[in-house]
Image (tube, coloured by chain):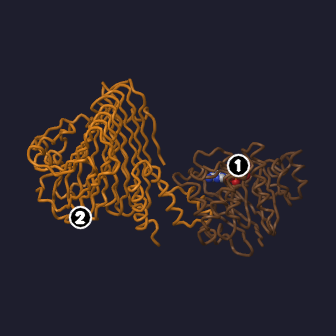
Chain colours: A brown, B orange
Amino acid sequence: MSKLEITDLQVSVETEDGPKQILKGVTLTINDGETHAIMGPNGSGKSTLAYSIAGHPKYTITGGTVTLDGQDVLAMSVDERARAGLFLAMQYPVEVPGVSVSNFLRTAKTAIDGEAPKLRTWVKDVNAALEQLNLDPTFGTRNVNEGFSGGEKKRHEIAQLELLNPQVAILDETDSGLDIDALKVVSEGVNRFRSQEGKGVLLITHYTRILRYITPDFVHVFVDGRIAEQGGPELADQLEAEGYDKYTKAASV
Amino acid sequence: MTVTDSVRSALEVDKVESHLHPQGSFDVASHVVPTGREEIWRFTPLKRLKGLHADAEFQPSATACTWNTPAGVRVEGVDGDEARALRGVSGLVPNTRFAARVLAEVPSTLLVDVPDDADVTEPVVVELAGSDAGVTEAGHVVLRFGRHSRATVVLNHTGHASMAQVVEVVVGDGAQASVISLQDWADDAVHLTHHQTLVGRDATYKHVAVSFGGDVVRMDTNVTYDGPGGSAELLGLYFADAGQHIEHRLFADHDAPRTKSNVMYKGALQGQGAHTVWVGNVLIRKVAEGIETYEENRNLVLSDGCQADSVPNLEIETGEIEGAGHASATARFDDEQLFYLRARGIDDKEARRLVVHGFFNDLIRRIGVPSIEGQLMSTVEAELAKNVLRDV
Ligand SMILES: Nc1ncnc2c1ncn2[C@@H]1O[C@H](COP(=O)(O)OP(=O)(O)OP(=O)(O)O)[C@@H](O)[C@H]1O
Ligand SMILES: [Mg+2]
């Protein structure tokens, strides 16, 4: 069971010239088991939406609400949100020098579950997750995201998704920078995740190609901090053919 | 975070009047008592040194000194002529009053002698356990690694003491020597120490300074070379708490061709008045063609009210060098790192803990003595418990 409800969300960032509003009222509900795709041009505020839900300190919520199964997400700290069942696969995963992937994964798993995982099964699970994402078994000894290729970073994010197994996953451009093989591997990981009962996915992307592997239930066109249009998977095909022009023009008048 | 890199930026460092060609002397009278205005004393809180930099009496030692003796190694306190002959054995000609006084006034020497060709796997561990910081005392230590020998010596300083110290290290040709000096003092300790090493031809030397405890710890670590091909790796790790002053001054004096120096010091600071100083001097003399040097200092500031001074200084007198560079950076916790960890459910404290451990990890792994590495991980943990992980 999981329902992420975003209502009239307004978000600003601090700039040199004072606060700048980025999200101008976003309303979106991800019901139990649904996959939603958000598509939009560069700078439209897609990452801002993802980070705001996850609680990044850079963003100030100036209005609206976000709830997960009725609980007030905005009142929670970043780690509380993750423990409540939210997961954000980041567009630009961060390097953490000196912290090994295996240590990181174990610490995160322990935090999410409230107890340390059973050593035997855990090692097996980690190895399986890495293998399914075509990551070398020695990956565990490397420092988190340090020296990873762009594709490795993204695959590592999805390995975490599978191991931590949240209720709702927000994937911020997980497809960008992936070659076709890696895209398939990543999509399979996301599909394994959402094949489970009741898991929600918010898939943020720039391109339609990932939607060939992960079929969304709904597609939202995101322009200038708002949802400009929504529809079913066919909306993605239309965007593929026509681009964002008609929406960006509408937004600028 | 500010990072400076490359030779170019190093060369642009203003040529303050060089203090890297000091006129040393064994004669105590030729060294005036420092006032604090001198380049080499400007960061040090002289008032807290209990006169060790000046004329404090060197009293009978209140520090217990014990050691193990792995097979084939001689470890002994020596006096008389033998001790006298060891003064300056590393090529040290004192450039400070305290070093000159230690050589002139301390009658005995703790000698660790590793014979030529000896391969000693078990580290020689010398425990220096102080019992009274009210006693001002001084010590002279000589670590001699014979030609083509391989050995590790650990000096572990603990407890209460006010100590002036000179450690002279001689690394024979082709030897592989490691010296690890742990300053794990109690809060009231004052430690003024000079480590001078002569690195033999084609020898490999590793020096590790680890400073956690003490009210004031100042360590001058100098390296010179006895022939071409010598290599020195100078590592340091420090953690300053409220009110502590921890100062490390490095000097790699490239006075022979094709020699190498690699300096890496990392420190963390927490609490009001925590002060660390790192000064990395490298001098590449005219004869020192084809050398390589790199020095780096990184500081992680964990709370308000701390001060980390970091001064790299490279002076180059020949154009014929293989490589020279330096980097110095002082930073607070990286919000993006913390966010990434916390977005995976890891709470704020645990995230900070991971970041600090991560900061020191690569350095700790380079020490090469497993028992020390393990001990340091727990020491870092204990330091963190004092501040970063404390409930606020
Ligand atoms: N500190 C800041 N100062 C000024 N503008 C900012 C700041 N941070 C973000 N913005 C602006 O907010 C807008 C939304 O950025 P966001 O990263 O959410 O876009 P995006 O839709 O994810 O774009 P992309 O497709 O490139 O990932 C952009 O126009 C960006 O320039
Ligand atoms: Mg983005």
CB of residue at label 2: within 8 Å of ligand 1?
no
Residue B87 circle label = none
Q: Using the rendered view, name the quadrant where residue B27 is placed.
A: top left
Q: Nearer the viewer, residue B204 or B210?
A: B204
Horizontal side of B165 relative to B239 (left or right) equals left
The residue that mark 2 highlights is B160
Q: Give B374 or B333, whichever is nearer the viewer.
A: B374
Name which residue type carries label 1: Asn
How far is mark 1 from mark 2, CA to CA? 55 Å
Q: Amino acid at mark 2?
A: His
Q: Position of residue A111 (x, y in %)?
A: 60, 68
> Crowding near pointer 2: few (<14 within 10 Å), some, many (20+)?
many
- Left/right of residue A79 with respect to residue B245 in the rendered view: right
- In this view, which residue lies farthest toward the front? B71
The percent position of residue A42, horizontal first and vertical second, equals 74, 48
User: Which residue occupies the extreme bottom position in the image?
Assistant: A70
Helix, strand or loop status at disc 1: loop
- Dot 2: what SS? strand
Q: Quadrant of residue A51?
A: bottom right
Asked whether the residues under the numbered discs 1 and 2 touch, taking CB atoms below 8 Å apart as contact, a structural biologist would say no
Looking at the rendered image, the disc whose residue lies closer to the viewer, 1 or 2, is: 1
The tag on residue A134 is 1
Q: Nearer the viewer, residue B273 or A109?
A: A109
Tell me which residue sits at (66%, 56%) in the image.
A127
